[in-house]
Image (cartoon, rainbow, N blue to C red):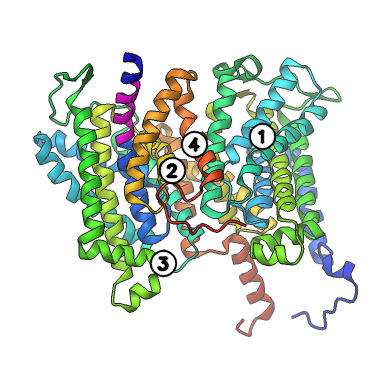
Amino acid sequence: MRTGHYKERWSQYVALSDNPTVWAWVAALLAALLIAPVVLDGYSTTLLVSALIAVVGAVGLNVLTGTTGLISLGQAGFLAVGAYTNGVLLVDHHWPVWATLPASGVVAAAVSLVVGIPSLRLKGLYLAITTLAFSFIINHVILYTESVTHGPNGIFVNGAKILGFDVQRGAPLYYLVLGVAVLSVLTALNLARTRIGRAWMAIRDHDVAARVMGIDLVRYKLLAFMVSSFIVGVAGALISLQIRFINIDVFALILSIEAIAFLILGGLGSIGGAILGAIFLSFLPEMIRLAFAMLGGSTASLLGNYLFEIRGMAYGVVIVVFLRWVPDGLIGLWRDIRTYWSNWPLAY
Amino acid sequence: MDFLLLLVSTGLVTGAAYGLIAMGFALVYKATGVVNFAQGELMMLTAYVSFSVADRTGLSFLMLMALTIPISMAIGLLLERIFIRPMLGEPVFSIVMVTIGLAVILRGLVILVWGPDPAVFDVGLPDTVIRLGPVPFYPAQLVLVAAMAGVTTIAWIFLRFSRIGIAMRAVAANETAARLSGISVSRIHAFAWMFSSAIASIAGVLFAANFKLAPDMWFQGMKSFPAVILGGLDSVIGASVAGLVIGVVENLFQGYVGQGMREISGFIVIVVVLMVRPYGLFGSREIERV
């Protein structure tokens, strides 16, 4: 048990971690992630890329839903905006990737203002319904502004190059995604320990009290919308790079539910939780596939026909089970285990 | 003029379906304070169950409904017991998320059990065209509108005069006071789910009879949201009226504004209503705005 643990300066108090062991583990994790594509085969690398993109999206949604407490069911809409911005700029306007990625975020953030300003005075269920409505409207706009977005034909996203590397496959894509993921996690972690992050949490915990303390609700809610959508937009751009063909069916409602499931599974309001949830759920379809393969025979073929449905049902089951039995999510489980371990043999 | 009349009349038919689904939403919200995102899926599930019953037995329409409604009430009760009851006392957000999880599970379940292909659901209604003035209708369309009118009337009488209906309103108004005067709140929640599931089954069967029985029927639940919001989340009667309005508005948008507007005009209505009058046309004004 660590005792006598005093914080004497503010900088110590807000430091990301005061524990050298944590830094050592983070360094080990980063090193492992860096050599992963060298060690792993192509298929596993692709899975890792999907998981890391999910991490970016989950961290983005967490800013809005976890930290600020504004529930959004419109994640799919912002992903679509990011993906289409990336696709259009890359293919039709021949922008380089290093410019299209931030541009996707900026456009998504701008769109989020359109969503955010009318929703400012709503919260809870009403906000969830509004964001849901907006994601349908965004999909519709994309489908019917054919001159810009190619409408129902979709876009073949290709020709993304950084320093001559094709960043749409294999190791270059992996490193690009890893870089973006690390950047967005760092951004979220650092925002959480500034005035902005504390203001967001105050709004989440009690908006009237936050207002009384002098937090400008309009400003900080809009800021949360913009930061969240920026990150989600970049995640959308990464999706378009990975899957190489985007149309509106990619960004169906199930994506928004999936994103909420990431947060619930990991533990709402925690960045670590968002990361854990995103990684765990990204590997879930793969785990289901392996489980069915072990059962073999007819069940495996059943899965082949209904993979999409079974995946959706698995998300549903995860949401229901975790809300019922593990409301603090994976990160809560981890905290319990850690406390138990460091207090052992005393009960905690 | 004929064009307008046609748009309005078909709009009323679609709107009747929206109204029925929206009443299910409003009933559950009124009694439990939870938006049941699985209402559309409940409608789809009960319609498929009814389809299987009709397929096995070949009953006439009225007998089929007489059998479908109790079965759906049992389904509603079962879902409430398994998914919602254990969450009693948790934050509303968690319960709403559970209904979203339930929705996704039901969606997958329907495809796993009944397959992904659309089916023709013959409910035993004739398909001779009936003319009301200049406008032709199919019997199924008229039955849908009549069912909505009937259910709305029954719901009004039920909420106004019956013991359970009054208890439901009491729970909606003040849960603690209702409990203190001897109302079993958890039983009222179960009743709300049973009745909303019964309404969902009527909506589901008639929607399938009018359009088709397909595993994307759940989307009608999403498209009924505008009606719930416009009517006011906690107003059952408001939901049914607003359903008709939304149905007509969608058709007029589609007819006069542009292709594809049908799909989103309702959602535009949501955004406008929530900005201007978030408690809807008939809802009670207690929504907190900060």
Q: Amino acid at mark 2?
A: Leu
Q: Is residue B159 left or right of residue A40?
A: left
Q: Nearer the viewer, mark 4 or mark 1?
A: 4
Name which of mark 3 and mark 2 comes first in the sequence.
3
Circle 4 residue: B269
Q: Is residue A54 left or right of residue B183?
A: right
Which span of residues is magenta-colored? B7-16
Q: Amino acid at mark 1?
A: Gly
Q: Find residue B55 and report its horizontal and vertical position in percent.
A: 15, 33
Identify the element where label 3 is drawn. Answer: loop
Query: In this figure, which residue is indicated by the disc labeled 3?
Result: B88
Q: Determine the residue positioned at 63% across, 28% down.
A: A243
Q: Residue at x 17, y 26 (%)?
A: B139
Left or right: A331 as drawn, with respect to B169: right
Determine contact: label 2, label 4, CB under 8 Å: yes
> What type is the residue that disc 4 sits on?
Val
Q: Nearer the viewer, mark 1 or mark 2?
A: 2
Residue B10 is a magenta residue: yes
Whether the residues at callouts 3 and 2 have beta carbons within 8 Å, the answer is no
| Residue B252 pos. (x, y %) | 42, 24
Image quadrant in which you'd find residue A101? top right
User: How crowded is the residue under tag 2: few (<14 C-alpha within 10 Å), some, or many (20+)?
Assistant: many
Residue B230 marker:
2
Same subunit, labels 4 and 3: the answer reads yes
**Vertical position of residue A16 compared to residue A242: above or below:** below
Q: Chain of mark 3?
A: B
Residue situated in front as seen by the camera: A300 or A190 = A190
Label at residue A236:
1
A156 sits to left or right of B160:
right
* Callout 3 crowding tier (Cα within 10 Å): few <14, some 14–19, many ≥20: few
